[in-house]
Amino acid sequence: MNSDSFEPQPLTPPDPEAPQRLHRLRTLGLGKPERGFDDFARRLAQTTAMPWAMVNFLDEHGQFFAGLYTAPTTQPGIATPAPSTEPGRRMSREQGFCPHVVARRKALVLDDVCSYPRFAGNPVVDQLGIRTYLGAPLIDHTGTTLGSICVVGTEPRAWGQEGLTTIKVLAAELSELINQREHSR
């Protein structure tokens, strides 16, 4: 193989739906932190017993956590990351796993992130110690994938069918709330 023709595989898949998503996010006024999304993220973390949960939208700048919950402590024996390493409200598309959920338009379950070579090298694995991920897309009534909801933790976890069902049900619930938001305008 000619080394001149080698192109590295991007960390995140192509996103052909990006222009439509940007239009929908602007139409819906989704682009800033919102208490309702923070509350939803808290509920998501509590439902799944995970230390971090996010309501995530992808815009032209990358990922934006309109809803964010970070537990005051993580699992017993594991220190909470220092404030400088806690997830903020913005993250590049190359970090984390939600861009894959958005591009695939379906849930992603990673019991142990390190068991998946494609995901084990993601920067959040080393920077935040993320070892498990569960996420599902937020698809609005137009069929546009606006973003995702997800939970992450620092220990591997077998999610099983129950975890997959839970994240899908909660994503559908939040998608419906977003649809209602548009209709109430």
Image: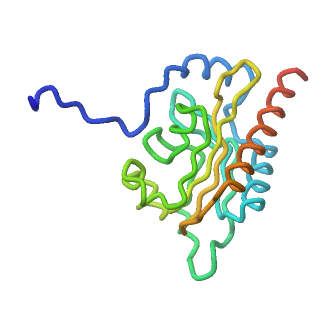
Quadrant for the C terminus, please.
Answer: top right
Pick whichever, 99 or 2, lies toward us: 2
Q: Residue at x 73, y 26 (%)?
A: 140
Quadrant for the N terminus, please.
Answer: top left
Rendering quarter of residue 13: top left
The location of residue 174, given as percent across then percent down, is 79, 38
- Identify the image's colour scheme: rainbow, by chain, secondary structure or one colour: rainbow
In screen coordinates, is 67 left or right of 106?
A: right
Residue furthest right as drawn = 184
Q: Residue at x 51, y 38 (%)?
A: 100
In screen coordinates, is 59 left or right of 177?
A: left
Rendering quarter of residue 177: top right
Residue furthest front as drawn = 161
Q: Which residue is drawn at 55% across and 17% down?
A: 19
The location of residue 103, given as percent across then percent down, is 53, 31
The location of residue 160, given as percent across then percent down, is 64, 58
In screen coordinates, is 33 left or right of 59?
A: right
